[in-house]
Image (cartoon, helix red, strand yellow):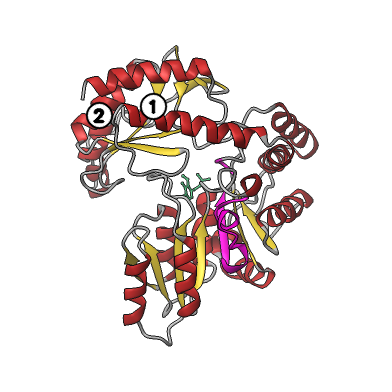
Amino acid sequence: MIRSVFKKKASNPILKRCANDDHTRLRKRYELWYHILEDQRGTRVTMDGKEMVMLASNEYLGLYDHPKVVEAGQKALAKWGAGTMGARSANGGRSFHTDLEERLANFLGKEACHVSSAGYLSCMSSITGFAQRGDIVLVDKNMHSSVWDGIRLSMADVERFSHNNPDHLRSLLEELDPSASKIIAIEGVYSMEGHIGKLPEILDIAHQYECFTVMDDAHGIGVLGKQGRGTANHFGLTDRVDIIAGSLSKSLGSTGGFVAGDEAAIEYLRTRSKQVIFSAALSPCQAACAMAALDVIESEPEWLERLWSNTRRYKALLDELGLDTWESETPAIPIIIGNREKAYYFWKNLCDKGVFTIFATAPGVPPGKDLVRTAVSARHTDADFEIIETALRYAASKI
Ligand SMILES: Cc1ncc(COP(=O)(O)O)c(C=O)c1O
């Protein structure tokens, strides 16, 4: 049996740090995260034997258990086995990788693409693959941690601009050394806030100051643009974004990540990024499921339509209840409570009434923005909405 770190007598400073960490102790005591679900089917999950409505998945189109996606995964597993047993740079490359990359590049409107076994790796590599010491990365301060990690590893200098604020970005650029190479890093759809990145304004600035642009569109793919081709497509600006990175674990219902751009840029990434060079390649099953999800997205437009009609329905309910949704414009919808304790009880009341959401507090969100993160799926039904509405009314009445 594994002994609890809290009971073990710590024998060195790091073990003492682990044993005495207040954040870990609080997390364990209030059981806020790391929940274990015993079952999942469509929008329903089972936790501690109780069926709940999942209202926090990033799987916006609900394709993770689509029959065509499941069948493709099963076939790939039968044909190729479970793993790739190596990195793409060594013995891990397979024809299903290049098939998926070609398909994704096409879908996104880019020349080339590289897939990895996690979105986190891909988004990190979208910076480490291009930035180097002496460069400057200008980054939205609410950017996902994968990109922040990429910036730190790249050894480039960093300038953060206020969230989704092109004026602040411009004012920073006015002060910087014009001879330094610069990268602007933004998200297409900000995952916590649900805001759409101000791409047109930011790309104009990037053009004026000759900056390379990296957009993490993990939450825009499958959600925005024609057939869910993402934020760049939504604005008709695909050609002007240098790099589109993202995840296969959101609307594509699988696991893994991608970086797409010009062929020269993607080949350079393959030469330079350690996350690409030294990590085992995407598994056959993950690749096949993502490929099948792309087929479904292109052949069954009803999922995208349902996603947006469900989003409108859900937003109307939250507005009617007077809840603050941080001006979310997408199916990723936070409910801002603004106080850690109240946000905890709001989350817990939803949980008790059978709705699974995610509690988020500082430092994960800005101070005063303690929130419950929710996300709508194309798969939510009338029956789901009844449960969601009852739970939200109850939780809102207790704030
Ligand atoms: C904006 C953003 N980028 C990158 C990632 C990492 O993707 P993955 O979970 O597939 O590793 C996430 C996942 O939460 C994300 O929200």
Q: Which residues are magenta?
A: 229-250
- Residue identified by numbered label 2: 344
Is residue 29 visible in the rendered image? The answer is: no
Residue 323: horizontal and vertical position, in percent? 29, 32
Q: Which mark is residue 237?
A: none
Callout 1: few (<14), some (14-19), or many (20+) C-alpha neighbours within 10 Å?
some
Identify the image quadrant of the C terminus.
top left
Callout 2: few (<14), some (14-19), or many (20+) C-alpha neighbours within 10 Å?
many
| Residue 131 located left or right of residue 77 | left
Please name the amino acid that badge 2 sits on: Tyr
Residue 247: horizontal and vertical position, in percent? 56, 48
| Residue 93 located left or right of residue 21 | right
178 or 316: nearer the eye? Answer: 316
Magenta stretch encompasses residue 244: yes
Asked if the residue under mark 1 is in contact with the one under mark 2, i.e. CB atoms within 8 Å, the reply is no
**Residue at 25%, 31% in the rendered image:** 343
Residue 70: horizontal and vertical position, in percent? 70, 29
Please name the amino acid that badge 1 sits on: Leu
| Residue 35 located left or right of residue 285 | left
**Residue at 45%, 56% in the rendered image:** 197
Which residue, as the protein is rendered here, is positioned at the far top?
49
**Residue at 36%, 30% in the rendered image:** 318
Magenta stretch encompasses residue 276: no
**Residue at 21%, 20% in the rendered image:** 398
Residue 306: horizontal and vertical position, in percent? 58, 31
- Residue identified by numbered label 1: 317
| Residue 274 located left or right of residue 81 | left
**How many discs mark residues in the rendered view?**
2
From this view, report whether residue 6 is shown above or below residue 119: above
